[in-house]
Image: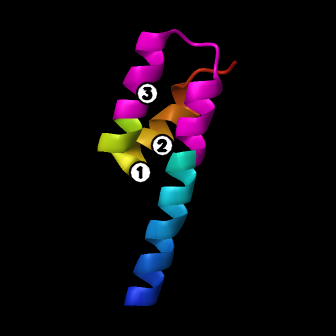
Amino acid sequence: MGIEVGGLLGLIILIADVWAIINVVQSSAGTGAKVGWTVLILLLPLVGLLIWLVAGPRG
């Protein structure tokens, strides 16, 4: 995988993580849940995003 592909993949993951964090902050979940999801997404960018997509707050 070339540097261009790796950089593009990293950019896509970054954009998806920012989108997920914005959705977490705007959700109706409690403050603790918001902090937990945000920390998970920041510490484990790809895995945290996937877990949030499956089990995250829906409102």
Q: Say which element carries label 1.
A: helix
Residue visible at 41% across and 39% down?
A: 41
- CB under 8 Å between discs 1 and 2: yes
Q: Badge 3 is on which residue?
A: 37
Amino acid of disc 1 = Leu
Q: Is residue 20 above or below residue 59?
A: below
Q: Which residues are magenta?
A: 19-39
Circle nearer the N terminus (1, 3): 3
Amino acid of disc 3 = Trp
**Furthest residue in direction top, as rendered:** 30
Residue 4 percent coordinates (x, y): 45, 88
**Furthest residue in direction right, as rendered:** 59
Q: Say which element carries label 3.
A: helix
Tag 2: Cα neighbours inside 10 Å, few (<14), some, or many (≥20)? many
> What's the CA distance linking mark 1 and mark 3?
13 Å
Q: Badge 2 is on which residue?
A: 49
- Front residue of 5/36: it is 36
Q: Badge 1 is on which residue?
A: 46
Residue 30 percent coordinates (x, y): 52, 9
Total labels: the figure holds 3
Q: Is residue 58 magenta?
A: no
Predominant SS along the magenta part: helix
Residue visible at 41% across and 12% down?
A: 32
- Front residue of 14/51: it is 14
> What's the CA distance linking mark 3 and mark 2?
9 Å
